[in-house]
């Protein structure tokens, strides 16, 4: 496509100077041709069209034929200009492709004046008209190999970012867990006084604020690092080390070191080639990211210290004074009362950032007001006592980033898309072209409105459908749908107001044109509108309030949490807090925003002394040095205002709220005397005669139904020909009774195993805890002994909020890393790296949390039973959390462990206090895994397992995790022989069992009589 540029306003060369290459070719003598081309080349080199030398502005080298082109600092890479085929070609690189702008001059001897031409008069009286034509092209500049390498770079860096996110979630989880533990110790055990809880509470709450802000900043840096590596590292290349050296550094750390490690391990014959290579790669990339983050922070700080001189107009500032004024500016900006006015503008104004809302309302440059925010805080500051805040006589303008660079995308009829309009970022500015040749058409506008309406309807129906699918009560569905409708009506009202204002601007423009005597013609010009926020400072704090709040805030946030981490002996937590505090401090006080919003530009950054900005900086940089420094600063400062930062902030706040609610709920339940794990009333009911069984022929029973299925260690079996425990269903039943009240367990054991076969030992656990006072009494478990001298430890699953926190602490990192692995192609190859990361994250736990790990007590109890010598055989079982604890305890004590719907210990095996091996997990553990149950899939794949069906609807996956449903499935599938079927099996949809007494009664009718 060829574009005719506007009048260049420059003279044209004479005919001799304008001899074309084709004329030169006609020169017979080749030496004359070379001389001619050399002369033309030298003449043109006196002023290259575009691009920069290292120091000189392009205006000193510009050709008289061509208009000057400036690179704006929003470009990640500067343009290059070459002379090719009698044209000046501007080359813009963009992620695997290049935008080529070919600029040519067309000169005609014509008496008719044409549009978009410049006129030149020559000495012979001849007139020539010159038109500048610009042809836009796109050329691909990538290859499969380069895409593969960039994809590999990005995958490795993405894993690093995932690790940092899981690290962030872990910090928040451990803070909430530690807080809940401290409160429980005070309330339940009465250790210390009420004052003892104040210090942990203060330390935890204050640290949460710092961690949230610091972790958000960390994730923003990680996202920028990932996107920069994927884009070819333009930001890394701008750090001043040179493109060649920077690319070599990236290659060495991301590919070179890992590849060298891999080859070296192959030659050495190592058995851990993959795991060592992955860990080396991860550490290498983490180091590169650390250097990237340090340099980003350095750039922000150095630019703030440079520009603060211009803000206060003091050239002879010392470094200490610059630091003082930078902090003062940031703190004053944060405390000032600001009003934010939202306007819709007509875009036909050149220097928009220098016009305020009042001037735009005059002389035909209309601005329509949409909304105002910030009045409440201004009123609050004005009500404060005298000497704290002052009200400015004239509100002071604060320039936004959009006003400074005016780098806003356009909506035209060519760039319009249905999904693009609907999915746009609501807080981002856009320019909509409403009239002219590039205007959005009426069909596109109506389509956008229809898409908006249909999208809202779809959102509401989707939410309602998901709640119906999940069998949510109708009242809740109605309340949620009503809330969504109200919200979208409010949003729709704002969209309608925007369209109404757009039409008003067009009508006003038409009216102005008619009054001026101009013919309104859409083909002559474009009219566009855009939304813009204008900010004014109305009140500001006094110097005493500014510095007083600064010192109070930083002393509190620095000393109390840090001393608490040191007090709790959490070295990793203390170091992490220092790192987050530094990130938070840098983001708060060395943000370029408060300085730039006052200056209205990036100032004289990159300019020589005495030079002024080119067109106030709106059109671009005048020199290569200015462009490099301002482009680097532009992309660095935009990290604080990107959509990714807002997403990370919302996500981390969500996790913090969830963990906080669970911790508070746990503390509340303990303080009220509930939720301490006394057990519940049994929810399994047996008919009076216990004569109902599922009759499955013995030869059809699956081997998995045996109690010893999957366990090859004959010396560690619990069942034998004389043992009451014969079936896998027996362990499922024992895992269920661990939830029940102690006074109801023995009768259930007699019903299930028969009288005189199984016994609940109520004395051994209190005796054990008296013998080991150093172990906290946090886990809930029971011991069932049998007539053959064997015993089974039954560990209870999740019933309290504290149990949930234990679940999360042990398996959250493994679960999140599994999600990341499953989302990646060939994710299974990163298992070794995931285990390494899980082990590192476990070091975040405080010593107090490690001391109350449930598995520590269950492992010590099994060791206690074994040392007593009273039992011929031992086993451990449990459901859900109890199953996971049983697997860890079984592997640590080399005791048979059977988990019902329990998470795996494969990934977390090295993160526990007493690490366990894969051989121990394979030899001593076994798991029952119901279909569609998510919990058993957390922590890795079980090495020994039996998969059973879940006979519920697809919309009820939670029921698949219930222990009594798993027991019904085992009874129905395996044939219970001498194990009675309880009433709940029929009630949840299983077939009627057979009455072996021949009475013909049904289980359903017998259960109704209970």
Image (spheres, rainbow, N blue to C red):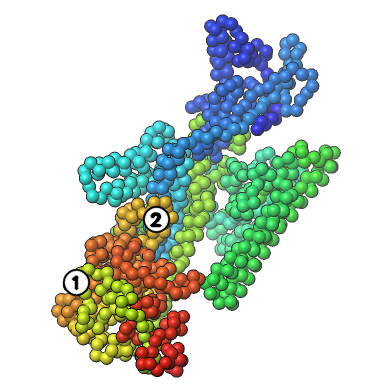
Q: Position of residue 77 (x, y in %)?
A: 51, 35
Q: Is residue 613 left or right of residue 551?
A: right
- 23 or 172, which is in the foreground? 23
Q: Is residue 340 left or right of residue 989?
A: right
* In this view, 765 is above or below 352: below
- 747 or 92, which is in the foreground? 747
Q: Quadrant of residue 190?
A: bottom left
Q: Are marks 1 and 2 in contact (CB under 8 Å)?
A: no
Q: Quadrant of residue 322?
A: top left
Residue under label 2, please give it: 821
Q: Residue at x 45, y 72 (%)?
A: 958
- 760 or 764, which is in the foreground? 760
Q: Residue at x 55, y 16 (%)?
A: 41
Of callouts 1 and 2, which one flags the residue occurring earlier in the amino acid sequence? Answer: 1
* In this view, 73 is above or below 791: above
Q: Position of residue 8 (x, y in %)?
A: 68, 26
- Quarter the C terminus occupies: bottom left
* In this view, 793 is above or below 443: below
- Quarter the N terminus occupies: top right
């Amino acid at each position: 496509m060829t574009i005719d540029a506007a009048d260049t306003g420059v003279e044209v060369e004479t005919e001799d100077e304008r001899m074309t290459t084709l004329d030169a070719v006609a020169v017979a003598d080749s030496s004359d041709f070379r001389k001619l081309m050399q002369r033309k080349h030298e003449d043109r080199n006196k002023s290259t069209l575009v691009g920069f030398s290292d120091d000189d502005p392009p205006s000193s080298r510009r050709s008289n034929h061509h208009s000057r082109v400036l690179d704006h600092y929003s470009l990640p890479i500067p343009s290059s200009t070459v002379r090719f085929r009698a044209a000046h070609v501007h080359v813009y690189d963009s992620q695997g492709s290049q935008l080529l702008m070919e600029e040519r001059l067309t000169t005609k001897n014509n008496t008719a004046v044409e549009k978009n031409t410049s006129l030149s008069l020559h000495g012979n009286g001849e007139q020539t008209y010159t038109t500048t034509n610009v042809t836009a092209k796109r050329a691909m500049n990538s290859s499969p190999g380069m895409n593969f390498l960039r994809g590999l770079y990005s995958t490795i860096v993405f894993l690093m970012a995932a690790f940092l996110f899981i690290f962030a979630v872990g910090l928040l989880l451990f803070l909430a867990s530690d807080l809940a533990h401290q409160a429980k110790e005070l309330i339940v055990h009465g250790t210390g006084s009420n004052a003892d809880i104040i210090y942990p509470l203060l330390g935890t709450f204050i640290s949460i604020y710092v961690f949230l802000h610091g972790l958000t900043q960390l994730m923003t840096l990680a996202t920028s690092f990932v996107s920069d590596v994927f884009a070819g590292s333009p930001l890394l290349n701008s750090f001043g080390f040179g493109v060649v050296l920077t690319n070599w550094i990236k290659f060495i750390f991301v590919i070179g070191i890992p590849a060298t490690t891999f080859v070296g391990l192959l030659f050495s014959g190592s058995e851990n080639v993959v795991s060592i290579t992955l860990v080396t790669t991860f550490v290498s990339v983490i180091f590169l990211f650390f250097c990237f983050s340090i340099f980003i922070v350095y750039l922000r700080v150095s630019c703030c210290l440079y520009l603060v001189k211009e803000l206060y107009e003091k050239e002879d500032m010392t470094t200490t004074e610059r630091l003082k004024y930078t902090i003062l500016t940031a703190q004053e900006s944060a405390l000032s009362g600001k009003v934010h006015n939202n306007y819709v503008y007509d875009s036909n104004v050149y220097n928009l950032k220098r016009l305020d809302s009042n001037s735009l309302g005059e002389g035909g440059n209309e601005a329509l007001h949409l909304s105002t925010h910030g009045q409440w805080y201004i009123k609050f500051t004005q009500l404060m006592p005298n000497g704290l805040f002052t009200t400015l006589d004239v509100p002071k303008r604060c320039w936004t980033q959009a006003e400074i660079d005016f780098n806003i995308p356009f909506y035209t009829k060519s760039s319009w898309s249905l999904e693009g309009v609907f999915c746009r970022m609501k807080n981002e500015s856009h320019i909509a072209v409403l009239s002219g040749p590039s205007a959005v058409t009426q069909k596109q506008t109506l389509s956008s409105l229809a898409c908006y309406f249909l999208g809202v309807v779809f959102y509401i129906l989707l939410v309602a459908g998901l709640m119906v699918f999940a069998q949510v009560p109708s009242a809740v569905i109605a309340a949620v749908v009503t809330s969504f409708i109200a919200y979208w009506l409010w949003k729709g009202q704002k969209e309608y107001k925007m369209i109404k204002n757009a039409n008003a601007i067009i009508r006003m423009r038409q009216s102005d044109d008619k009054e001026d005597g101009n013919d309104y013609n859409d083909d002559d010009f474009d009219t566009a509108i855009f939304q813009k926020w204008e900010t004014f400072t109305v009140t500001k704090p006094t110097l005493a309030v500014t510095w007083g709040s600064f010192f109070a805030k930083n002393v509190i946030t620095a000393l109390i949490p840090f001393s608490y981490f040191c007090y709790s002996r959490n070295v990793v937590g203390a170091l992490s807090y220092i790192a987050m505090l530094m990130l938070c401090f840098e983001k708060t006080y060395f943000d370029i925003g408060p300085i730039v919003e006052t200056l209205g530009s990036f100032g004289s950054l990159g300019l020589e002394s005495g030079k002024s900005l080119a067109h106030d900086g709106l059109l671009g940089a005048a020199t290569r040095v200015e462009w490099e420094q301002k482009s680097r600063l532009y992309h660095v400062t935009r990290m604080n205002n990107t959509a990714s930062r807002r997403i990370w902030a919302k996500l981390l706040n969500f996790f913090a709220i969830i963990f906080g609610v669970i911790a508070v709920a746990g503390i509340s339940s303990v303080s009220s005397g509930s939720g301490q794990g006394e057990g519940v009333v049994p929810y399994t009911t047996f008919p009076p005669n216990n004569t109902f069984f599922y009759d499955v022929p013995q030869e059809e029973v699956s081997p998995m139904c045996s109690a010893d299925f999957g366990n090859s260690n004959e010396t560690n079996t619990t069942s034998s020909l004389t043992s009451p425990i014969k079936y896998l269903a027996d362990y499922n039943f024992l895992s269920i009774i661990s939830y029940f009240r102690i006074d109801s367990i023995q009768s259930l054991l007699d019903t299930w195993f028969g009288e005189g076969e199984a016994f609940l030992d109520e004395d051994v656990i209190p005796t054990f805890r008296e013998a080991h006072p150093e172990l906290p009494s946090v886990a809930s478990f029971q011991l069932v002994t049998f007539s053959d001298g064997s015993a089974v430890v039954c560990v209870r699953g999740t019933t309290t909020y504290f149990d949930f926190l234990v679940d999360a602490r042990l398996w959250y990192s493994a679960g999140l890393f599994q999600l990341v692995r499953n989302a990646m192609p060939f994710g299974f190859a990163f298992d070794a790296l995931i285990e390494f990361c899980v082990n590192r994250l476990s070091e975040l736990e405080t010593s107090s949390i490690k001391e109350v790990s449930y598995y520590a007590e269950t492992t010590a109890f099994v060791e206690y039973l074994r040392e007593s010598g009273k039992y011929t055989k031992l086993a451990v079982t449990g459901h859900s959390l109890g199953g996971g604890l049983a697997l860890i305890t079984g592997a640590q004590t080399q005791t048979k462990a059977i988990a019902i719907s329990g998470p795996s210990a494969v990934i977390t095996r090295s993160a526990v206090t007493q690490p366990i091996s894969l051989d121990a997990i394979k030899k001593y553990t076994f798991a029952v895994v119901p279909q569609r149950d998510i919990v058993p899939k957390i922590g890795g794949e079980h090495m020994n397992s039996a998969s059973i069906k879940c006979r519920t609807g697809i919309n009820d996956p939670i029921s698949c995790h219930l222990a009594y449903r798993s027991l019904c499935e085992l009874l129905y599938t395996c044939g219970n022989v001498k194990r009675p079927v309880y009433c709940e099996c029929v009630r949840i949809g299983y077939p009627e069992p057979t009455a072996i007494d021949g009475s013909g009664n049904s289980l359903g009718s017998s259960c109704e009589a209970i």
